[in-house]
Image (cartoon, rainbow, N blue to C red):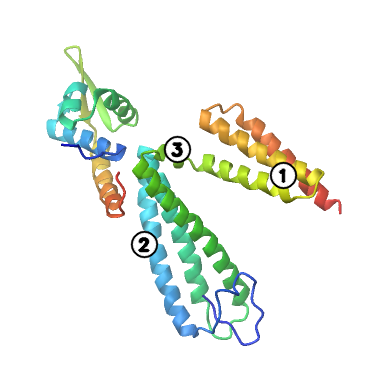
Amino acid sequence: MRRKYRGTISLILDILNTLRKLGKATASELSYGSRVPYDRLKPILKELTAKGYLIVEESEGRSYYKLSEKGTRLIEELERVKSMLEDLGFKP
Amino acid sequence: MRTVERGEVLWHWERPRVSYVFPPAALFVVGILHLISAALALAIAYRLLRTYSTTRQPLLLSVGVSFALIGFAYAFAGVSGVLAVPGAHWAKPIQAFLLLTSCILSTFGYVLLLMSYVANRLGVLAFVAHPLYWSDVVSAIALVLSSAFAPRGRFRVGYVCMGLGHLIRAVSLRLGVLDVYVVGDLLKVFGVLVILAHVMSR
């Protein structure tokens, strides 16, 4: 079955929601959980971390990502905007 | 929307639009409805552009700017309608210019919205949503075409320089070679100075 197209806004939202569900996760776990290819995931994680939406924790030689408070607020904002764009007929 | 009195000379852009006299009360109500629409459109634009400022997603920018343009257009049309007070002759030129501005803004807004839909479906939004890039491309085309109608000599040189300047800016933005952008800017300003100096010397 052909998978539904996801724009960048949906990808970011899926990544953040997966992280909220898992609490903390490595990039591979996030890639698997949000079904976002690793090569597409990495730059998004880098940008979200740089902007303070994600926190990186080093443990046992691995990098774990966690949602910051700012990141939790971003989920709400993106969900509102995404449904707004979908109502207008866009594929966010 | 504005009231027109018998025998009143209309601005040329109003002629095809205003063919009969609207009652001021109706214009006032339509004006208020326009203002409500404007407030809603601007609220949507604000929400989209605020999210754009944090996520930098081009879809949010292009749709946000479309709604902002449409919102301002409706606000101007609304104010124009509200100014339709009986006997307020002083308001007529203001109403006419508000209507003209409203038409221009809404046209840009609708076109940008359509472009956003098409680009979103084709998956090329990052390309379309670069407002600086599109502004330069459209300006370059307009100026080069204008040069074909301008009389020979300094006028044509001025238009061509301006057009080339915008084209260089567009190419530099597209390729990310921003050092060349200033060359385009210089060419553009040289072109406009040639034209303006020529006109002022008359």
- Same subunit, labels 1 and 2: the answer reads yes
Q: Examine the image and state in which quarter residue B53 appears.
A: top left
In the shown orientation, is residue A51 left or right of residue B92? left
- Kindly state the secondary structure of the residue where label 3 is placed: helix
Residue B190 position within the rendered picture, expressed as x and y whole percent measured from the top left:
74, 38
- Kindly state the secondary structure of the residue where label 2 is placed: helix
- Same subunit, labels 1 and 3: the answer reads yes
In the shown orientation, is residue B80 left or right of residue B36? right
Query: In this picture, is A85 found above or below B93?
Result: above
Q: Amino acid at mark 3?
A: Phe
Observer-nearest of B38 and B196: B196
Q: Nearer the viewer, mark 2 or mark 3?
A: 3
How far apart are the alpha carbons under marks 1 and 2?
40 Å
Residue B12 position within the rendered picture, expressed as x and y whole percent measured from the top left:
64, 71
Residue B151 position within the rendered picture, expressed as x and y whole percent measured from the top left:
79, 50
How far apart are the alpha carbons under marks 2 and 3?
28 Å
User: Mark 2 or mark 1, which is nearer the start of the sequence?
Assistant: 2
Q: Which residue is mark 2?
A: B40
- Kindly state the secondary structure of the residue where label 1 is placed: helix
Q: Nearer the viewer, mark 1 or mark 2?
A: 1
Q: Which residue is mark 3?
A: B127
